[in-house]
Image (cartoon, helix red, strand yellow):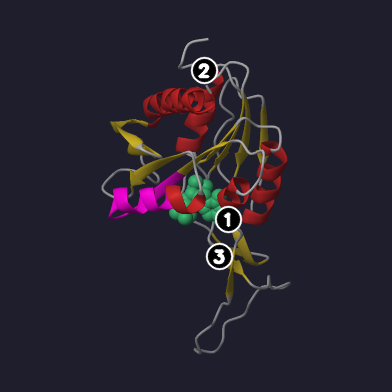
Amino acid sequence: FGAGTLAGLRVVVSAGPTYEDIDPVRFIGNRSSGRMGFAVAEAAALAGAEVTLVAGPVSLPTPPGVARRIDVRSAAQMREAVLAGAAQADIYVGAAAVGDYRPLEVAPHKLKKQDGAPLALQLTENPDILKELAARSPRPFLVGFAAETRELAAYAQDKLARKGLDMIAANRVGAGLGFEAEDNALAVYWPGGGEELPRAPKRDLATRLVACIAERYRATYA
Ligand code: C5P
């Protein structure tokens, strides 16, 4: 096997946003389109991996070659699907924009206006899926994403260390890049190294990222 191949490896990729319900008709979401994660899933399958794609609410077709797709809505559902899949996985790529918070309570009926008074919504933190995986033994090779609007390198490297990851792919959001954009640019870091993947369509970038993951995976488990 060449260094860029994922042949014989099982890869779980999470992609897209999560939606946290407020009441039967409203939710808290985010602007992740799922395109980067779907592109990573496709590239990993092309590299020979058996790919499980855990997708948040997106309207994207399943990429060719992806072995299975699990559609979820909330962070809790994503956590469950990822933890189940990751138990047998060699590599987990967390490309999903998992909501940090969810409403403490989901209202059983549609919330009504408060006659001009402010409406307070109490939120509670969601579990961190990557962090939870990092604490497991054995655990898959862990790749996280970091979307930042400033201090990209510092925040990403801090996240790499703090979450106990093997690799992190950082992208600047805004200025036609990142969320909802066709193109992306990534700075990839691992303990003791890194690589810049310059601006390119998300599919090309995903191919390069997967090659980088394969190389680091081989270097780690050689
Ligand atoms: O800390 P932050 O949310 O910026 O980290 C982003 C990375 O962590 C992504 O890889 C994302 O999939 C993952 N994450 C997670 N569970 C959360 C929040 C983020 O796995 N609750």
Q: Position of residue 59 (x, y in %)?
A: 55, 40
**From what the image shows, is residue 181 above or below residue 75?**
above
- Answer with mark 3 or mark 1, whichever residue precedes in sequence: 3
Q: Does the residue at mark 2 contact the one at mark 3 (Cβ under 8 Å)? A: no
Region of the chain picked out in magenta, as a range? 145-159
Q: Which amino acid lies under the numbered mark 3 shown in the image of this protein?
A: Tyr
Q: Name the residue under label 3.
A: 101
Q: Does the residue labelled 1 lie within 8 Å of ligand 1?
A: yes
Q: What SS does tag 2 mark? A: loop
- Answer with mark 2 or mark 3, whichever residue precedes in sequence: 2
Residue 46 is one of the magenta-drawn residues: no
Q: Mark 1 points at which residue?
A: 128
* Residue located at (50% from left, 27% from top): 217
Q: How far apart are marks 3 and 1 (CA)?
A: 10 Å
Packing grade of label 3 (10 A; few <14, some 14-19, many >=20) is some
| Residue closer to the observer: 215 or 40 | 215
Q: Is mark 3 within 8 Å of ligand 1?
A: no
**From what the image shows, is residue 39 above or below residue 181?**
above
Q: Mark 2 points at which residue?
A: 47
